[in-house]
Image (tube, helix red, strand yellow):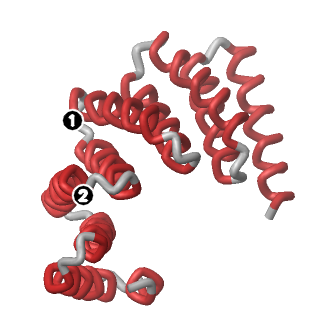
Amino acid sequence: MENNYLEARTMVSDAKATFEKIGNQLGAAQCLQSLGDIFRMEDNYSEARIMLLDAKVAFEHIGNRLGAAQCLQSLGDICRMENNYSDGRTMLSEAKVGFEQIGNQLGAAQCLQSLGDIFRMEDNYPEARTMLSDAKDAFKHIGNQLGVAQCLQSLGDVFKRERDCSEARTMLSDANIAFEKIGNQSGAAQL
C-alpha cells in the first residue's frame, strides 16, 4: 500500500509542476489538495496540513470557494483525528458556512456530522445530538443513505453513553436496517 501512495504522490507532484509551468492555477491547487489528501490517508498529518493550507490559499486566490471549503473540511477532520477538538470545530464550522454559501448540501451535512462526532468525543451530548440529528436530516433530504445510517449509529452511541438504553436500541436498530438496506454489511456488523 505504501508503494501506491508513493507512486500517487509522484504522479500528482509531476502534474502540479506541469500545471504551474503552463499557468493553470486551478490545476496546481487541485494537485496540492490531492497531495494533502494522500498524506492524510497515510496518517502523515503534518505534511497533509501544509499541503491543504497551501491549497486553501491557492483556491481562495483564484476565487474557488468549493476547493477552499473542501480544504477546510479536510483540515478540520485532521484536527478531529488528532483530538484537537477546538481547532477542528472552528475549521469545520467555517467549512460548513462555505459549503452553505455555494449550495453544497453534501459538504455542509458532512461538516455537521464531523462536528457532532467532535461533541460526542468531548462528552457534550446535547450538542452532539443536535448536530448529528441535523446532519441525519440533511443527508436524508439529499438522499444520502450512508450518511443517514452513520448518523443513526453515532446517535445510538450518544444515547448509550447517556445510559438511555431504549433510545440507543432504537437508533442502533434503525442504523442496522439502514446499513443493510444499502448493502453495507461492514457498517451493520459494527453495531
Cα separation between marks 2 and 1: 28 Å
Q: Position of residue 143 (x, y in %)?
A: 20, 64
What amino acid is at disc 1? Gly
Q: Quadrant of the C terminus?
A: bottom left
Disc on res. 51: none
Identify the secondary structure beneath mark 1: loop
Identify the secondary structure beneath mark 2: helix
Q: Position of residue 68 (x, y in %)?
A: 44, 26
| Residue at the image position 42 percent from the left and 80 percent from the top | 187
Along the horizontal axis of the image, is 51 left or right of 89?
right
| Residue at the image position 76 percent from the left and 48 percent from the top | 8
Dot 2: within a 10 Å radius of its alpha carbon, few (fewer than 14), some, or many (20 or more) residues? many
Q: Quadrant of the N terminus?
A: bottom right
Q: Residue 152 versus residue 65: which sits nearer the camera?
A: 152
Q: Tell me if residue 65 can be seen.
A: yes
Disc on res. 125: 2
Dot 1: within a 10 Å radius of its alpha carbon, few (fewer than 14), some, or many (20 or more) residues? few
Q: Position of residue 120 (x, y in %)?
A: 34, 57
| Residue at the image position 26 percent from the left and 30 percent from the top | 97
The picture quadrant where one finds residue 91 is top left
Q: Residue 134 versus residue 19: which sits nearer the camera?
A: 134
> Which badge, 2 or 1, is on the more N-terminal residue?
1
Residue that label 1 marks: 103
Vertical placement of residue 54 versus 106, above or below: above
